Amino acid sequence: MNAVGPSGQALADSRELVRRIGAEIDAAGGSIGFDRYMQRVLYEPGLGYYTGPNRVFGADGDFVTAPEMSSLFGRCIATQCAQWLGGSGEIVEFGAGSGALAAQLLSALRDAHALPRAYAIVELSATLRERQREAIAAAGEELLARVRWLDELPRRIDGVVLANEVLDAMPVRVFRLAGTVVYERLVSLADDGSLGWAERVADERFAARVRERLGQAWSAGADDARGFDGDADASVDSAPLGYVSELGEQAEAWVATVGSRLVRGAMLLIDYGFPRREFYHPQRDQGTLRCHFRHRAHDDPFLWPGLQDVTAHVDFSGVAEAAAGAGLDTLGYASQARFLLDCGLLEACVALPREDPVGWTRETQAVQRLLSEAEMGELFKAIAFGRGVPDDAVGFRTRDRRASL
């Protein structure tokens, strides 16, 4: 990777985080699970990527999310939320980041005379809360008056749950296959104080889950996976040598927990990932773990702990199973491009004022990125679950793929 690395206080913070993780590794007898490592580098109080002082959003940061690209993204989400809210209920957003989506969503719902009873943001970071507050206030003080910040999950949710690019940042467990033996990949500390990979034979419970997931994916084949040749005879016993991938247990547990609090309404999740047959395809043999630093992606999670994003793609089949276990109905599953188109993205784009040619060009270029298969349009998916709401979501009218889950 050729990006210029961090320096100064940021690098000192990263080294302190490595020291703390190293102490935990020593106390644990020489290694910890990758999920524990990912938890600390992303969420360690004061030093983690999402909780420390060094992360910058947007063009000057490590990546740009959809609502930071175009205000039309939030307008499309508002169209779907308005249908589910039906003039009442609240919106609960997780992972609100810079507050861009909340500001866009509330502005669009105000324009449509469909504001929710309340807008709650679950956020632990005081720094992010302040940034979110500023973004929403800039959209209107009357909108800010409807917003409250929560330190934990609400006990009951009546309305809509939103999470844009949240599941990919939840810690995962990593495994490797060697023949029929399942190994769990761990994190250890070298003599020079650096962090790196280690392995152990997986405990039987974890190994059984891995075999179950791979058996489901490979026995079914992957005929509907874009860019792959199907292999209906694939099985765990015929795994590619050194096959590596992940289990997103925490993301699935989160969906189940939040789903159990949803007494009436819908949950909309937007993230990058695949249904199980694509996620665990034999040709995807190095997993989906990726890191992001200053708009460059790489695959070394130990490079700058606490200063780079560490993510994994979402197994949407696992997410759907978790939601079903919580008693929710699946309301739709589609590519981000199709979801946004069904929610009126092109119509909103056509209606943009053209008095400012530079601004108009910027917006239309952002729309292209949101829709393009080569950018976010196909890799990102929208999935929705509900309790007590009709199965007629506007965002899944034309190309609902829930059968692929």
Image (cartoon, rainbow, N blue to C red):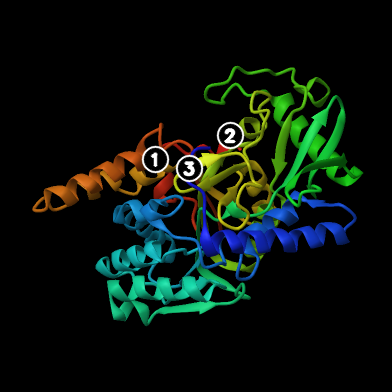
Residue at horizontal 42 percent and vertical 66 percent from the top? 85
Q: Which residue is mark 2?
A: 404
Separation (CA) of disc 3 from disc 2:
38 Å
Residue at horizontal 57 percent and vertical 73 percent from the top? 124
Q: Quadrant of the C terminus?
A: top right
Q: Which residue is mark 1?
A: 337
Residue 120 visible in the current orientation: no
Horizontal and vertical percent position of residue 204: 91, 43
How many other residues sit within 10 Å of disc 1, few (<14), some (14-19) or many (≥20)?
many
Does the CB distance between marks 1 and 2 fall below 8 Å? no
Horizontal and vertical percent position of residue 276: 65, 36
- Against 290, residue 232 (above or below) is above
On residue 370, which mark appears? Answer: none
Residue at horizontal 83 percent and vertical 23 percent from the top? 237
Residue 207 visible in the current orientation: yes
On residue 3, which mark appears? Answer: 3
